[in-house]
Amino acid sequence: MNQIAPGTLNIPKDWDRRGLPGWTYHSRALFELERSDLFLTHWQLAGHVGDLPAPGDWITFDLLGERAVIMRGRDGVVRAFHNLCRHRGARVVDGASGHCKGAMVCPFHGWVYNLDGTLRGAARPETFGDMDRSQFGLKPVEMEIWHGFIFLRFHPGPQPSVADWLAPYEADFAAYRADELLPADAAFWDSELPVNWKSVRDVDNEGYHVPMAHPALQDLYGRSYVDRVHPGNLVSSYAEFGDQPGRLWSVKAYVGLAPEQDWLPERLRKAWTYYGLFPNAVIAFTPEGAQFYQDIPLSPGKTRLTGRMYRRADETREMRIARYLAYRIDRETSKEDQQLAIWSNESMKSTAFEDFHLSDLEYGVRVYHDGFRRILPVTRLPEPPAEDQLANINENLLLTTTESQSN
């Protein structure tokens, strides 16, 4: 059966099996707190250096009213800026990705920025008086690169450096040579789902549902699926394929065709691995390639699902076919998870809903919810507070918690 693996954290003998109360999935006031105190203050995965192979290449990342552009400069350095012209606030680039030959030119009034974000010049500069160009470059966004993956943080927050935070994943990402990944064809994708973002995470943070809900995954790796929990609100999963031939076409073809990558450590040569990033993203590896996917909240009842896919630089024809077959399996799994998220989310407004009752196999959900409750203690309340009082109650609970910890 699926299991929680012995890991850095042990499951308490008499742990509280309840999850977040239903009201937390549709409160507008809580959504505003999530924006300010969770998403904008925590590291967000925006892409990979492989998405920016040449000077002038850029990708964008938008989150809850903030927008960033990540660009490789003429000097080869990758930098992140607010995608906001210092004149009137227009986007200096538009779209998911692109290339600037020599500079960024604001489409509103033609202000020109160098690839390192400095202001080259304003249109009709004589009309701005004694403007100091050095004071009007694009504003930087805090950025860190870890094993090739690009992380942004819009506001200062509680998480340590990305390397310290993701230290439990260090050995695996080094083994996968994650910094060498390149974007696959049609690498970027996105769609919308009519659910609260937490419902998507709830489905993704446990493997208890795999045997029933995901026929292809169950066919692929049977009983080998294992969930692990780590410090930093991190939940990862591991599964091996090849012990059974597979009955479904995509699974049977994948198992029979996937070439063994002898450069990987033996434990990863036939593994599919998933690395959760609190609060809203996952990086997944197969021996042939990788992808990340994340949930971008748009409103209390709407979530943007987006991600990018990557390949190996030395990809062979067999690896490319195996990667495509893995994509077919994952595509069906994603559809199944989306339906589960919809069903779960719609129950949150029902008078019959009485909180989750979690299995030991769903301890990863509990770990995730505990992290959420520490940041927003108002979510510990079983009944919804008045919307216009929610922020004040949360602040008081934070102060109470801080005082009790200091005594």
Image: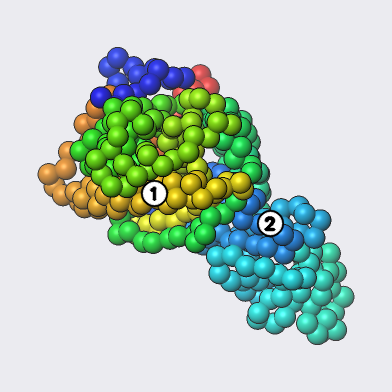
Q: Position of residue 389 (x, y in %)?
A: 36, 49
Depth order, front residue of 213/118:
213
Quarter of the rendering occupied by the N terminus: top left
Q: Is residue 20 visible?
A: no
Looking at the image, the residue that sits furthest to the left is 352
Q: Which mark is residue 206?
A: none
Q: Residues within 10 Å of mark 1 (few under 14, many from 20)?
A: many
In the image, residue 99 above or below residue 262: below
Q: Is residue 133 visible?
A: yes
Depth order, front residue of 7/44:
7
User: Residue 170 sits in which quadrant?
Assistant: top right
Q: Earlier in the sequence, mark 2 or mark 1?
A: 2
Question: Residue at (56%, 59%) from the top-left corner?
Answer: 61
* 192 left or right of 395 in image: left
Badge nearest the viewer, 2 or 1: 1
Q: Which residue is mark 2?
A: 53
